[in-house]
């Protein structure tokens, strides 16, 4: 009888652990995706049959920034209701994720949904000053001399924030300027 009780307890513990681990769904969407973009087939990913999402009243539970996503009652798809700006949501934090709770009735279950908002290269580098004047003495500098400039910053993260820039002759930058007095 003692072995059966231990086996029953083990089964209950495993079921509880499975319910906790199985209650997490993750999706990823690039920032600035259009409103109406399907993020994922939530009902299908939760193992529900066609029409079951509506019958069991699958719905999002109100949480913070939830206004950016909605759940289609008929299909159980998770959709963007507005564009997401990763820099506005999370600044320089990585990864950037919205955490949602989804409720399913009959029987009652709560699922945690994590929506990662991935960065796209949507921000241009910004220099501290729009213009930089350098005064270079003609006789004191050698050819190939370098002059430090202040670096630019970029609101993007990761590979999209890596900055590389060079100055080349153009109408905005004079590399061969001669002043005649």
Image (tube, rainbow, N blue to C red):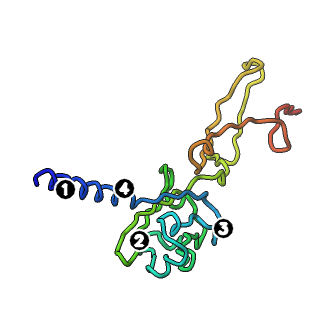
Residue at 64 percent of width and 31 percent of height: 148
SS of the residue under disc 3:
loop
Residue at 68 percent of width and 28 percent of height: 147
Q: Count residues near mark 3 (Cα–Cα under 10 Å), then give few for <14, some for 14-19, many for 20+.
A: some
Q: Nearer the viewer, mark 4 or mark 2?
A: 4
Per the model, the C-alpha gap separating discs 4 and 1 is: 18 Å
First-in-chain label (3 vs 4): 4
SS of the residue under disc 2:
loop
What residue is pinned by disc 4? 21
Residue 63, disc: 2
Residue 9, disc: 1
Q: Nearer the viewer, mark 1 or mark 3?
A: 1
Residue 98 x %, y %: 47, 62
Left or right of residue 80, residue 15 in this image: left
Q: Count residues near mark 1 (Cα–Cα under 10 Å), then give few for <14, some for 14-19, many for 20+.
A: few
Residue at 64 percent of width and 40 percent of height: 163
First-in-chain label (1 vs 3): 1
Q: Nearer the viewer, residue 181 or 114?
A: 114
């Amino acid at each position: 009888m003692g072995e059966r009780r231990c086996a029953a307890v083990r089964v209950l513990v495993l079921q509880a652990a499975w319910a906790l681990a199985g209650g997490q769904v993750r999706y990823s969407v690039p920032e600035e995706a259009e409103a109406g973009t399907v993020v994922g087939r939530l009902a299908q990913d939760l193992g529900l049959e066609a029409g079951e999402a509506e019958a069991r009243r699958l719905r999002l539970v109100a949480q913070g920034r939830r206004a950016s996503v909605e759940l289609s009652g008929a299909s159980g798809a998770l959709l963007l209701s507005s564009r997401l700006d990763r820099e506005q949501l999370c600044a320089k934090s990585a990864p950037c994720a919205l955490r949602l709770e989804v409720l399913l009735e009959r029987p009652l279950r709560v699922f945690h949904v994590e929506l990662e908002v991935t960065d796209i290269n949507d921000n241009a580098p910004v220099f501290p000053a729009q213009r930089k004047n350098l005064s270079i003495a003609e006789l004191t500098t050698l050819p190939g001399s370098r002059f430090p400039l202040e670096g630019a910053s970029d609101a993007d993260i990761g590979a999209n924030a890596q900055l590389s820039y060079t100055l080349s002759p153009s109408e905005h930058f004079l590399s061969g300027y001669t002043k005649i007095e």
